[in-house]
Image: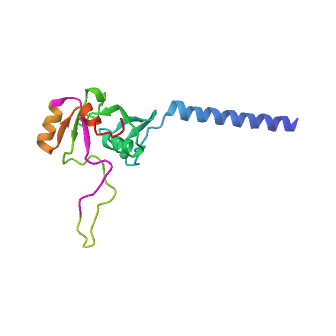
Amino acid sequence: MNTRRIALVGILIVALGVVAFGWFRFVAHPAAVACGYCSRPLHANLSVTAEIAGKTTQVCCARCAISEANQQHKSVRLIAVHDYSTGRSISPTNAWFVEGSRAMACEHDAMRMNDMKGTQELAFDRCSPGTLAFANKQNAEAFTVQNGGAVLSLAKLMSEVRFQ
Ligand SMILES: [Zn+2]
């Protein structure tokens, strides 16, 4: 009698665990806070959904996704990007990309410094040149007037992926 009760309690605990896991996994959907490739914090108006080798990942910026694809020797597909000025999710096919502007797209954890404590430009950064997305071309061009950089179409941007 007692062992049956213990077994019953055990089954109940396992069932509760399965329900809790299912709730977290499929209902709560905790939002990603860090880039799936480089672990930098995700920003609402920069984050990108990218797919490399069939795996979808939330990424800090389009540049990071292209760097990752080139490092993995794979092609990459952008699934969603965010308009830099509004933070709205937009389709990459309709987006215009600003590359190489003075606006720092991703935060850098450390500043490179020489032995005389003088700061130096970062030699390589996987998120550089920063790439921002805009829903319309006029906004992208207005941004480059203020901050420098060049306006690119999706096709032009993706031509930087070395393994198509
Ligand atoms: Zn990243």
Is-magenta flag for residue 134?
yes
Q: Quadrant of the C terminus?
A: top left
Place of residue 99 in the rendered image (x, y in percent of width and height, measured from the top left): 22, 42
Q: Quadrant of the N terminus?
A: top right
Place of residue 89 in the rendered image (x, y in percent of width and height, measured from the top left): 32, 30
Quadrant of res 81: top left
Residue at horizontal 30 percent and vertical 54 percent from the top? 124
Left or right? Give the position of 109 relative to 131: right
Above or below, 155 against 150 in this view is: above
Above or below, 112 against 73 in this view is: below
Outermost residue to the right: 1
Residue at horizontal 45 percent and vertical 35 percent from the top? 53
Left or right? Give the position of 78 relative to 143: right
Residue at horizontal 40 percent and vertical 39 percent from the top? 74
What are the residue bounds of the magenta stretch? 120-137
Foreground: 26 or 154? 154
Outermost residue to the bottom: 116
